[in-house]
Amino acid sequence: MEAAATAVGTRMATRRRQRPQQEPSEASAGDQELQSPQRRRRRRLQRRMEEGQEEAVFREIVNFSPDPLPVRYYDKDTTQPISFYLSSLEELLAWTPSMEDGFNVAMGPPARRQPPLHSQRPRTLLCHDMMGGYLDDRFIQGSAVQGPYSFYHWQYIDIFVYFSHHMVTIPPVGWTNAAHRHGVCVLGTFITEWNEGGRFCEAFLAGDVRSYQAVADQLVRIAQFFHFDGWLINIENSLSPAAVGNTPPFLQYLTTQLHQQVPGGLVLWYDSVVQSGQLKWQDELNDQNRVFFDSCDGFFTNYNWREEHLARMLKQAEGRQADVYVGVDVFARSNIVGGQFDTDKSLELIRKHGFSAALFAPGWVYECLAKEDFFQNQDKFWSLLERYLPTHSICSLPFVTSFCLGLGTRRVCYGQEEVVGPWYHPGAQEIQPLFGEHRLGGDSQGWVKTHCCLRDAWNGGSSLLIRGAIPPEVGDVAVRLFSLHVPVPPKVFLSMVYKLEGPTAVRVALELTTGDASSCHIGGISVLNAETSTKYSPRPLRVPPAKLARWAGRCGQTLSGGWIQRCYEVSLRGCLLQDLFINFSRPPGSQEEESFICRLGEIQVVGANSLLTPLAQVQAVTVSCIHWQRVDPSLDRAPTKLQLSCTLHWSYLLPQVHCFRIYCRTGTGSSSHRRELPGPEKPTLLGLAFANQYRVVKLAVDAARPGQDGRVELLVQPVPQEGFLVPEAEWGRAVLLYSSPHGSGH
């Protein structure tokens, strides 16, 4: 069954096909009443709401007194907020949430997926171990690094472990947000090693029950607070009889508490210590380590196994094969079956015996091969494993992606270039498609290849480049971009932003597949234009709700940079949305091979109800933790400059937002409180926030003149999950008025 709507060479189609059966609002920590450290000195700040204006005004007398930031939470060179780890038992037991911890809190739990993680389908775990960890990914608000590592084959993996050799490895929040957006759960690492690790273990495992329960309680609190999903426990030192005897009850208690506090949480044990207390890697699950497997959610084997180890483990696993993660060292160190570009040899045997796989350090493609070929090598590595990596499906709407990798050589906002220069922000990565090359069957020469591209972007730093050829004997070629499992509401809106490179008459279409449900009925498809004219819509909305009007505002138009947006309204009943394809078809009358290059800038699938609900408002914007620095006058001949750093907090329901864009305007105000109307200049983008707080760092402002206030307007733009621009009048804002001490401008 197929229905189509055509508009200016673009087609949107739905079709039903059979498919194998698959197994079955919270606020950020910044909103919590967390007390700032007492060492922070109080500032002379005054906050008030101007009558009739949604604006908070703060007053500050510039002061250059030293005010050191807590080194755990801020980079000593840049003063940017950073993700952190804990190095000792004392630090772990002493940890309590602070205001600074709010920067590192993920937006929420993993997105719903199908099959769910607890199904017995063999899983794929990625253990990210790169050069000690906490590299450029530690900068919570991003950095200006060029050519960083990026992972984007999320649809192939189920669990992401952030690994380092620090005792308590808390995953950097950018990784957690990116993984959760793709329905992937994230684990931190609890590791003890060498003699020092042995002393730590004796301290909390060899004592009474209260000692190990205190450690477990803290690990649960940390996972719950920072919104990641559990722990890999890696004890790589020998244990005394007392300590090893308490290890299974420690694991049982940790696992039970985590399941109660973190829905879907996981505790995994690494193959290291055996039940005698010896440090003796087994490369398999056996009688010597089975007690640890029985006490938690899963077992991660060491890497030097052979097929006979896998065969022996079948009996040991006793129906829990999916909970055994067979380790594969991608660096191919020591005596392994296959690593590097031969990792598929290991995967073939693991899947043959029905086990899950744990890929250790696939960043090998970045660390050991040419950086300029990173994307090609990354795609090659994962394409070789594709046949052994079952994908999971996205299960919720709205589904919106601009294909941004969370990095780029410039920042673009809906076709408009905002900032030029390299940037890296893992948490800004959008939902990524299935990558690879797809060829038509038989003797056909048709093909389609998808890969990421930093040369052009619609929103963010990259787009999806699709190249291919339509051979003379076929009318079209298509490639599946996303696997979905979404019960479709009665009415959905779809949008595609794209552009074709070079002269071509090839037509581009979105193609959706629905499940083999006898109740599925496709009522109709209508083209939406910005005008929502009666020519294209049988029931136009005379006064569409604000969110819908903004969402459809660019539909049917040619946009800046040559981008084109096509929008559709689809009426469905009783349908299950399963796959999203992009289809390329030859123009009428064409008899020759048609080659094409298409850039895909954005895809949106949005339920009508979410566009009919009112947009939440950013509220209660506050400015705190203010720090001033002088700029060396020899570096700038302009008027005296200062550098302002401060923390913004606000209130917003995070489930309704994708992120926040933080802007500023600077200038000079009067000495009164009255707000001056902003000038015509556009605000300057400072960065992105994925929590209800943001640290402004070293913002250059003019020093206040005698008798006048300096003025900084700080603006918080919510970016809704549905993917449209919110006008500035609806942003959150706060104004900081600052004056020189004693009325002096120096």
Image (spheres, rainbow, N blue to C red):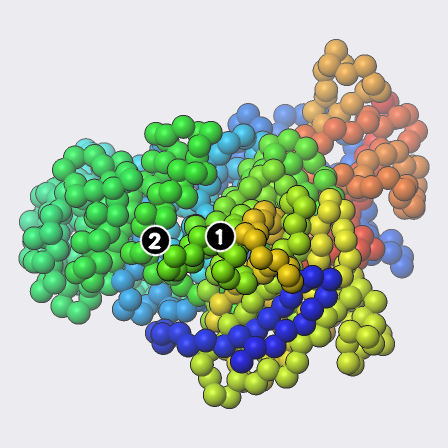
Q: Residue at x 39, y 57 (%)?
A: 443
* Residue 294 spot, x, y in % from top left: 17, 63
Q: Which residue type does callout 1 highlight?
A: Val
Q: Which residue is mark 1?
A: 448
Q: Are marks 1 and 2 in contact (CB under 8 Å)?
A: no
Instruction: Pick out the residue farthest to the bottom.
Output: 519
Number of marks in picture: 2
Q: Is residue 240 above or below residue 617?
A: above
Q: Nearer the viewer, residue 86 or 93?
A: 86
- Rendering quarter of residue 742: top right
- Left/right of residue 599 with respect to residue 207 in the rendered view: right
* Residue 170 spot, x, y in % from top left: 40, 45
* Residue 92 spot, x, y in % from top left: 36, 45
Q: Nearer the viewer, residue 479 or 124?
A: 479
Local secondary structure at mark 2: helix
Category of crowding for the residue at label 1, using alpha-carbon neighbours closer than 10 angstroms: few (below 14), some (14–19), many (at least 20): many
Q: Would residue 30 be visible to someone looking at this image?
A: no
- Say which quadrant the C terminus sits in: top right
Q: Which residue type does callout 2 highlight?
A: Glu
Category of crowding for the residue at label 2, using alpha-carbon neighbours closer than 10 angstroms: few (below 14), some (14–19), many (at least 20): some
Q: Which residue is mark 2?
A: 386
Q: Is residue 484 above or below residue 689?
A: below
Query: Label 1 to label 2, Cα distance in Å?
Result: 16 Å
* Residue 603 spot, x, y in % from top left: 61, 59
Q: For residue 459, which numbered disc appears in the image?
A: none
Q: Nearer the viewer, residue 516 or 507?
A: 507
Q: Would residue 522 be visible to someone looking at this image?
A: yes
Q: Is residue 711 above or below residue 573?
A: above
Local secondary structure at mark 1: strand
Q: Residue at x 28, y 38 (%)?
A: 340
